Amino acid sequence: METAIIVAGTPVVRIMLGLIMVSVPSYAFLNKDFPPKQPEKAQRLMHSFRESGYLLYFIQSTELLMGLLLLSGYFTPLAALILMPVSINILLFHLFLAPPIGAGILIFLMNVLLLWACRADYMALLHP
């Protein structure tokens, strides 16, 4: 019964996470003043990412592409798997550098739910 509830809620979670992963990097690409006012440590980290010349754009491009995959419904297990390290870093970023942590927890839990719903697709990776 629990599995049926998780699978039934998966399209809603997939679309919500996809919208987040598309809207935030899109806004960042279009708005040069992004990110909004943050604590000093968070600003220094984001400045370092931007100054590297590629890292911030790589992260945002990954979020955008995986968000589009989630919205389309194609390759959802792959998108959820690739987004897991991203969502962990979002969670830790909000935990240690830019509280409140609510957005980080929400993104992380949505990603975990998608991974759980797609767990059958990962079984081939775990068996030699």
Image: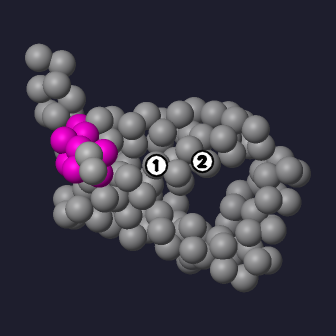
Name the residue located 34 percent from the left edge and 58 percent from the top edge: 79
> In the structure shown, which secondary structural element does the residue marked by tag 2 occupy?
helix
* Image quarter of residue 18: bottom left
Q: Name the residue rendered at 57%, 74% in the picture.
A: 58
Residue type, mark 1 in image: Met
Q: Does any portion of residue 118 appear in the rendered image?
A: no
Residue at the extreme bottom of the image, as rendered: 53
C-alpha distance separating marks 2 and 1: 10 Å
Relative to 127, say whether 30 is above or below.
below
Identify whether 111 is placed above or below 4. below
Name of the residue lying farthest toward the front = 128
Q: Is residue 90 left or right of residue 52?
A: left
Q: Residues within 10 Å of mark 1 (few under 14, many from 20)?
A: some
Asked if the residues shown at circle 2 and circle 1 are in contact, with their CB atoms under 8 angstroms apart, the answer is no
- Residue 93: where, in percent of width, then height? 69, 45
Counting residues from the start of the chain, the first of labels 2 and 1 encountered is 1
Task: Assign the magenta stretch its main secondary structure.
Answer: helix
The quadrant of the picture occupied by the N terminus is top left
Q: Which mark is residue 90?
A: 2
Dot 1 corresponds to which residue? 84
What span is in magenta?
Answer: 117-126
Q: Amino acid at mark 2?
A: Ile
Q: Residue furthest top?
A: 1
62 part of magenta stretch: no
What is the secondary structure assignment of the residue under circle 1?
A: helix
**Which residue corresponds to the image point at 74% horizontal and 74% vertical from the top-left?**
50
Q: Indicate whether 125 appears above or below 68.
A: above
